[in-house]
Amino acid sequence: MYQPAHFQITDQELINRFIRDNSLATLVSQTNTGMCANPLVMSLSRDKSGKLNLVGHMSRANPQWETTDTSQPVLAIFSGANAYISPSYYPSKQLHGRVVPTWNYIHVQVSGSVTFFHEAEEIRKLLQSLTLEHENSRQVPWAITDAPEKYINAQLRGVVGFVIRDLVFSAKAKVGQNKKPEDQDGMISGLSDDGENRMASLVLDNLNRD
């Protein structure tokens, strides 16, 4: 991924938090018929040695698990808030007019080696962990044990798990850090007026006052 230094994210905790908050990723792999990409929910997990892995699952009917060349790296792409940036946001437009539209976004790519697995108990553990991650903030969290055991067992047979190891992270937040402080302030106001409050907050969090 093209990575200008002022947009690069290197803080691993920030990257991990972003992945947790934006769990739906696109898994891209090389298959025997060409490139394949599917949206899949993934989460970070530490193995016994403490190394970070990405884990997820897909439908057994999805041909990606059968056709992926596991000798080649795969790529998981996580995308967050994004918004169009109008030149009209910038006070400098009124001064000299030398401004153009752009697009702000946050984007994380993770590459590594993938292994698919089929053991029902391992898939159950994976889904229990994933469910807990997304249900634990609810007043009455749903759990796999809330559903009939026979039904869950049937569902497990239709799922393939995967783990991506030897992770390489590339993270980018393009939120106006290369703009003058007054133009960043204008961006925050303009985005807020246009209802893009998530991006306005991200610009504010990364406001460059140097």
Image: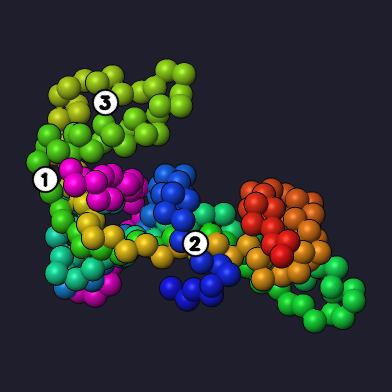
Location of the C terminus (image quadrant)? bottom right
Report, in whole angstroms, how far the alpha carbon at label 3 lies from the one at label 2.
36 Å
* Residue 119 lies in quadrant: top left
Q: Which mark sits nearer the N-terminus, 3 or 1?
A: 1
Quarter of the image with the N terminus is bottom left
Q: Which residue is mark 3?
A: 144
In this view, 45 is above or below 29: above
Of 63 and 40, which appears nearest the observer?
Answer: 40
Amino acid residing under circle 2: Ile
Residue 184 drawn at (x, y percent):
75, 62
Q: Nearer the viewer, mark 1 or mark 2?
A: 2
Q: Are the residues flagged by discs 3 and 1 in contact, CB closer than 8 Å?
A: no
Magenta stretch holds residue 37: yes
Residue closer to the observer: 106 or 66: 106
Task: State the residue lying farthest toward the front.
Answer: 210
Badge 2 element: strand
| First along the sequence among labels 3 and 2 | 2
Q: Which residue is mark 1?
A: 118
Tell whether 152 sits left or right of 203. left
Sequence-first disc among 1 and 2: 2
Counting from the top left corner in percent of width and height, residue 31 is at: 20, 70
* Above or below, 188 relative to 103: above
Please give the name of the residue rendered at 25% of the width and 63% of the height, measured from the top-left corner: 112
Position of residue 186 measured from the top left corner of the image (x, y, whole percent):
80, 61
Q: Identify the image's colour scheme: rainbow, by chain, secondary structure or one colour.
A: rainbow
Residue segment shown in magenta:
33-52
State the residue at coordinates (78%, 59%): 185
Q: Secondary structure at mark 1?
A: loop
Mark pair 3, 1: CA separation:
18 Å
The residue carrying mark 2 is: 9
